Amino acid sequence: MDKTNASKLCPQGEMTIYKAAELKSSLLSALDQCRTVEIDLSQISEMDTAGLQLLILAKREAQAKNIDLNIVGHSPAVIDVMDLCNMTAYFGDQVVISSGTN
C-alpha cells in the first residue's frame, strides 16, 4: 500500500481515558497511511495520563515505521500533564507557551 505524504490530526475536547480507544484508532490509522503526521493539540481541553500514553504510543510507532511525527499547538491542559510527568523533552517538539495577552 502506498502511503500519502502527510496527515494532520486535530483532536478536540478531552484526551482522556474515556476517549482513548477512539483516539488510538485515529492515531494508528494515520501512522499506517502517511509518511508525515502532525498532531495539533491546540483544541485539547482536558488530558490525563491515558492521553499522554497515546502520544507516547504514537511517537514509538512513528519511530518504528520511520515516519515523521510532529506534535504542535500544545494547549495548557497538554502542557500541564507533560510538565507534571516531566515528559516535555521526551517528545522533542517545540512547546510554545502563549502569554495570554493580546
Image (cartoon, rainbow, N blue to C red):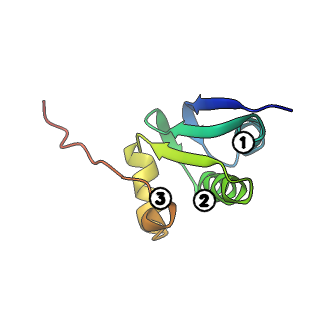
Residue 49: image location, x then y, percent: 60, 59
Q: Looking at the image, is 9 positioned above or below residue 65?
A: above
For marks 3 and 2, the one nearer the N-term is 2
Labelled disc at residue 49: 2
Residue drawn at point x = 30 percent, y = 48 percent:
96
Res 93 quadrant in image: bottom left
Residue drawn at point x = 72 percent, y = 42 percent:
31
Label 3's element?
helix
Residue 47: image location, x then y, percent: 54, 48
Taking the view exactly as shown, the residue that stands out farthest to the right is 1
Q: How much space separates mark 3 and mark 1, taking CA atoms?
A: 24 Å
Q: Is residue 43 left or right of residue 32?
A: left
Labelled disc at residue 31: 1
Q: Are marks 3 and 1 in contact (CB under 8 Å)?
A: no
For marks 2 and 1, the one nearer the N-term is 1
Q: Nearer the viewer, residue 4 or 59?
A: 4
Residue 34: image location, x then y, percent: 69, 35
Labelled disc at residue 81: 3
Q: How much space separates mark 2 and mark 1, taking CA atoms?
A: 21 Å
Residue 101: image location, x then y, percent: 14, 36
For marks 3 and 1, the one nearer the N-term is 1
Res 19 quadrant in image: top right
Labelled disc at residue 53: none
Q: Looking at the image, is 50 positioned above or below residue 4?
A: below
Label 1's element?
helix
Q: Are marks 3 and 2 in contact (CB under 8 Å)?
A: yes
Q: Nearer the viewer, residue 46 or 53?
A: 53
Q: Residues within 10 Å of mark 1 (few under 14, many from 20)?
A: many
Q: Quadrant of the C terminus?
A: top left
Q: Amino acid at mark 1?
A: Leu
Residue drawn at point x = 68 percent, y = 53 percent:
66
Q: Residues within 10 Å of mark 2 (few under 14, many from 20)?
A: some
